[in-house]
Image (cartoon, helix red, strand yellow):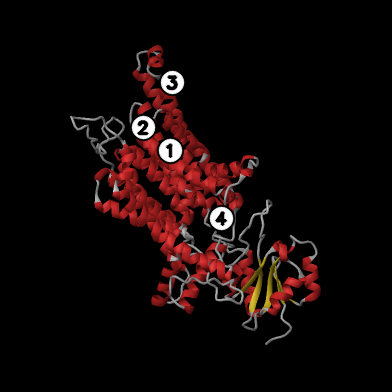
Amino acid sequence: MTAAIRKTETAGKAGATAKTPFAHTDGVGRVGVAEGSLLCVFFLGAILRIVGVWMPVNQQSWRESDVAAIARNYYREGMNPFYPRIDWRGDGPGYAEMEFPVLPWLMAVSYKLFGYNEVVGRLLSYVLSLLALYGFIRAAQHLLPEVPAIAASIFFALSPLVIGISKSLQPEGLMFACYIWAVYAFIRWLDDDSWKYFTLAIGATALSILAKATAAHLGFLFAVLLLRRNGFSSLRDYRTWVFAGFSLLPALAWYMHAHRFFVVFGNSLGVSNEYHWVGWDFFTNPAFITGIARSELFYVWTPVGVAVAAIGLLYRPDKEGTVLSLAWLCSVFCFFILAARTTSSAWAAYYHVVSVPAVALLFGIGVASIQRLLPGRGLVRFILVSGVAAGALALVAGNLGITASSVTRVATSGRRVVMALLAAAVLSTAIAVFKKLRSAKNLVSWVRMQTIREGVGYAALICIPVAFLFLGRATSYGERPSKLFVCAKSFAPLLSDNGLILASGGLSKDPTGHSLAFNISYMFYWLDRKGFNICVEDQTLDEVRSFSQRGAHYFVAEKRELNRRPGFEAELRGQYPVLADCGDALLFRISPANP
């Protein structure tokens, strides 16, 4: 049970609140956790995460391209970490509002020490992902009995969102690692009253919010834990205010500083130039709810993972552990709803990575409930082992299939894995039921031996490996370079001068009229050029001429964006010479002549 938030009965005349150690002696598991099993889970997660780490920045990700470009600009233009510069700066200096740029700055430090190599960023993200995995295993070990802790750790290790950010050039990697350690250290501080964990919790929380402001929703969870532990007397404890102040002030100072870049230069990485917040249309437009639910169901919970977690809520052996997980989820969903214009979008599925730890704990609690419903732990262990093997196999085989460009083979192998896994689960359940039946004196006595409860447990067993299989199949590394990356490489030799470029941007308004961050940065990074973006709504010849007058020599136009305004491509072809057509993009010269 979660001793960090459990209030024990008053004892003695003073009525003091006693701390209960994390000793799992309730029949669910042994005291402590099998270190060897969790070590195996850690190495499994490390192996799965390293696939794709060596991949260059060749996908159509504006965020990855911006991070890589900012690192390159630190390397070339100055190492002051407080002044990050983007490529789509137009004719300005390029200072941009963003999260505290820890990752691109560390990448630039590596470039200075060892030479330019963009793979360094993914290696740093990989190391951070291992730190997050280790932190979650420590938390699961602290909060759950042996087998449930292993199950929760496997769920976390196989999560497609967690694996996805483990090799991406995004601030989520640093934020998530600090996010996990902040929760773990906060709980340990409440348990042990240790200054070590108090300091670690402050540092991890502050850094997670600096890395990504969305991590501030942890404040809700911490408030719940404090109030359940000490009631409103927590408000009179100076350490509560020290924690809040030192956790929030660094981020507040940074974001105030960074906001000036948007005010002066108009550059922002989706902070002030996009409207994220919920409105009254949340109650009339079902797309918000369905979008959030879609990402949660298919990228976090998995359909069968919901069933295992539901068993945990129905037969919860650890009430306080369940409360902790639900409070964590509540804080996460408050953030999802508050920023629903972003978190409900399909492209923003990675924002839902913050719900993975709480869901993984609920999954582990569900496994603990299954253990209570069944006569022994051996079958649960077998199912865990077979399930993680199937999930890892599906993940690796599926991505090898994607790399080999054989969709048919991937689909066929996936069906075979599913059928083999289901057959193994059903066979294992049938064997267990048969043994139970043989141990009973007759059919009537067997039926009376809590058959319904055990039937629920046996049925839930099948869900465990299938959940791992869903997690494994949902992960994709995307190792093939995008078509536009290939286009950029073919355009590069044709850029005969050092002039600025104009590149296609996205929409600047959503259907309800709210602002969108329309800047698309990958062409600038791939072509190693500075310049301008043109949003879809401004696609006119007059706008193109105005950018040409400001120094743009070329227009790298994506056909998908051009087609949003019928006839615009034909107008461009009639006005400017086409230097190259790669099928997905066009390269126009929009300056009158070589300088």
Q: Earlier in the sequence, mark 4 or mark 3?
A: 4
Could you say whether the residue bearing mark 2 is in a helix, strand or loop? helix
Q: Disc 4 designates what residue?
A: 402
Q: Disc 2 designates what residue?
A: 319
Q: Where in the figure is residue 86, as x and y percent of width and height? A: 54, 71
**Label 4 packing within 10 angstroms: few (<14), some (14-19), many (20+):** some
Cα distance in 3D space between marks 4 and 3: 43 Å
Q: Residue at x 62, y 58 (%)?
A: 516
Q: Are marks 4 and 2 in contact (CB under 8 Å)?
A: no
- The amino acid on which the numbered mark 3 sits, given as a three-letter code, is Ile
Cα distance in 3D space between marks 1 and 2: 11 Å
Q: Earlier in the sequence, mark 4 or mark 1?
A: 1
**Label 2 packing within 10 angstroms: few (<14), some (14-19), many (20+):** some
Cα distance in 3D space between marks 4 and 1: 36 Å
Q: Quadrant of the N terminus?
A: top left
Q: Relative to the observer, which residue lies in front, 466 or 20?
A: 20
Q: Quadrant of the C terminus?
A: bottom right
Q: Is residue 424 visible?
A: no
Which one is closest to the eye, mark 4 or mark 2? Answer: 2
Please tell me the numbered disc located at residue 31.
none
- Above or below, 120 against 252 in this view is below
Question: Extreme bottom residue here?
Answer: 595
- Number of residue marks: 4
Q: Judge from the rendering whether residue 268 lies leftward or rightward of residue 219; answer left or right.
A: right
Q: Disc 3 designates what residue?
A: 452
Which one is closest to the eye, mark 2 or mark 3? Answer: 2
